[in-house]
Image: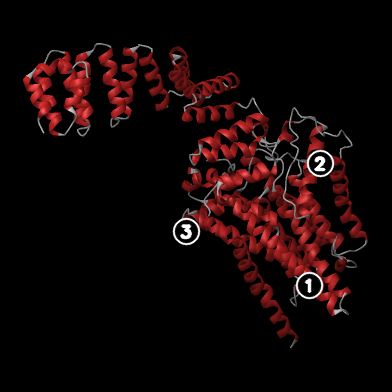
Amino acid sequence: MADRSASLRFVPDRYGVPLLLVLASFAIYGRALSYPFVLDDRLVIVDNGFLKSARAPFVFFISDFSRGTTYGPGYFRPLMMASFWAQGGLVGWSPGWFHAVNIVLHGLAAWALFLTARALGASRAGALFGGLLFLVFPPAQESVGSVVGRCDVLAALFLLLGWRSQILWESGTSGDDPPPGAARAAVTVGLLGLVAMLGKESGAIFPALVVLTPFALPAARGRWRAPGRLAIVVAGALALAVYLALRHAAVGGLILPPEALEHAQNPVARLSQPQRTYAALYGVGRLLLALFTPARLSVPFEPAPPHPFPPGGILDPGVLLPAAALLTLATAPLLLIRRRSALALPAALLFLGLLPGSNLIVRTSIFVAERFLYLPFAGVALAAAFGWDAAAARLRGSAQRLGTVRLGAAALIVLCAFLAWTRVGEWRSEEAIARRWIELSPSSTIGWNHLGTASVEKGDLAEARHAFEASLAIDPDNAAVLSRLGDVLVRLGQWDEAERRLERAIVLDASNPATRINLARASLQTGDKETALTEARAAYELSAGNPAARRLLATALFENGLYADAAREFSALVQNDPASPQIRHSLILSLYKDDRLDEAARAAEEAAVRLPDEPLFILWRARLAARRGRTAEAIDLLAAARRVRAPVDQWLREVDDLKPLRGDPRARGVAASP
């Protein structure tokens, strides 16, 4: 009878709870199923030819995450990339499927937390509360709503499963089954720990958890299990060694290389000590505020040069309070272990999970992000599971008070679920994400730059101009932003302002051909033909294979009266784009201006054959025939043009080469014909 009862309890844990959590995950985050790929998703998936052309998933385990993308080197997320490759091959590359997998994985991560809480001794109700709290944690929306946030979910999922395997072995029980063998436990712990690290770098805290666990579990005291414990610790260390070896082969080390940090969106990377540590502590404080309160993660003050940091000096509360909080979190696991508290391991996971994104040990690519809270909140959720049990035990004799506590817990779940449901909507578009970024850090240029780019893509040039100007108000010497603003001003026809911005951009970075192309365009419009030619030549030298640069060079040569050189460039452009009537017209006009009438006539004939529906080239043939004294041929061509309803009478009035034909009765007859 006992076996049957245990079996009935096992079924909900193994099947009912994960189904409930996955369904709840869809209820909260399901709106993301209709969202497109945005920001990093596009770089990593949409525009990544290497991802789609790889023949086997194993290549991602020896490749830099940036392979096939425009990311800088130093990122290593092979498990996520392999999952993208497999998913794309199985169900296609639609964004809805990628969002769906993220939602499922988040539900499974909540289930893994439930199982870990149960292994640590929490009741089923307490563990379910912890799993639900983890599921609805509002900042988790960044890891779930962003497709590339999958790395956070994978790391947490497998870390919790691997850790649970060790806890079960240490506790000497697995439900009513006999304790697993040490060898099997060591293999399971090592493999799952390695998979967690291959999910994301934050999984590298796993061996530290493995070392702490035997000291923190009250159930394991009094048992001499040193060989098994040693095997599990060695397995965790071996997993770390394998991960580091793979990472070294793929990217060359554990930390981001200088060339990646140089272009990172993290101001800490550009600070020297001790300001770097102060800024990191300030960031930790902002993370802790978002971790323990409903407040949105924000950075009111950007710790970037040349601003003094910390603004209040070494005793600034924005640095001292986070330092004190971090010291408390560091010592809490040790104190709780001495007290044999069930909260020791949740506290350890909270502290260790904070470290990878703190900028205190290694510098990250961005300063702060809500996804940095995904793993440490697992420690908070585990503590909440034991908090539920403690409240239930203390209030067992008072049904009313216990009911009030349970109602409060339910209200907390509902509130967090609503916040998560609301916040995941920010991933519906790049514009929405950019506006959230501005809210997160108004003194940073990141959000303004993304908003400007998104506004350009949707055609709102006025908003794009405002966004880029706001970015330059913060960082006036950003050459890339000056170039983007110049491009917007060119599109708006603000030629003088475009020239001013683009000239400054070139002073700061003379190697950007797009900047020089736009400056040449603006200079042509303002009448500065010499500057236009200089910039067009520089742009072409920087990108000889760029058709836009070559076309602009040809145009600038023409405007400067260098018709022979212009004709040469337009002729080359015709070879690359023979179906363009504009380029063929420019070639003919250049030859005409250079008084190479026979060559112009041949070019016009070739264009008329290639593009028979373009009356422009019949006009050119007639014009050139008249210019060369071939009146009969010119009138015959005008008659052919009239048959296709070309405005022959208008040509005879307005085109200088054709005006003399107005006295010819045959030409008048052609013009008057219906």
Where residue 19 sits in the image (x, y, percent)?
62, 71
Q: Quadrant of the N terminus?
A: bottom right
Residue at which label 2 appears:
281
The label shown at residue 91 is 3
Image position of 144 with respect to 664: above or below? below
Of labels 1 and 2, earlier in sequence is 2
Pick the residue in front: 667 or 180.
667
Where residue 374 sits in the image (x, y, percent)?
71, 54
Q: What is the tally of numbered marks visible in this picture?
A: 3
In percent of the image, x 17 and y 18: which residue is there? 658
Residue 23 shows up from this direction: yes
Residue 183 shows up from this direction: no
In percent of the image, x 28 and y 25: which residue is there? 584
Pick the residue in front: 327 or 220.
327
The label shown at residue 406 is 1
User: Label 1 is placed on what type of residue?
Assistant: Arg
The reply to whether discs 3 and 1 touch (Cβ–Cβ < 8 Å) is no
Whole-number angstrom distance, CA of label 1 to CA of label 2: 36 Å
Quarter location, residue 321: top right
The secondary element bearing badge 2 is classed as helix
Quarter location, residue 408: bottom right
The label shown at residue 516 is none
User: Label 3 is placed on what type of residue?
Assistant: Val
Q: Would you call the spot at circle 2 few (<14 residues within 10 Å), some (14-19), or many (20 or more)?
A: many
Q: Would you call the spot at circle 3 few (<14 residues within 10 Å), some (14-19), or many (20 or more)?
A: few
Where residue 93 sits in the image (x, y, percent)?
48, 53
The secondary element bearing badge 3 is classed as helix
Where residue 264 sits in the image (x, y, percent)?
66, 35
Image position of 320 with respect to 194: above or below? above
Q: Tell whether 525 sits left or right of 404.
A: left
Image position of 673 with respect to 123: above or below? above
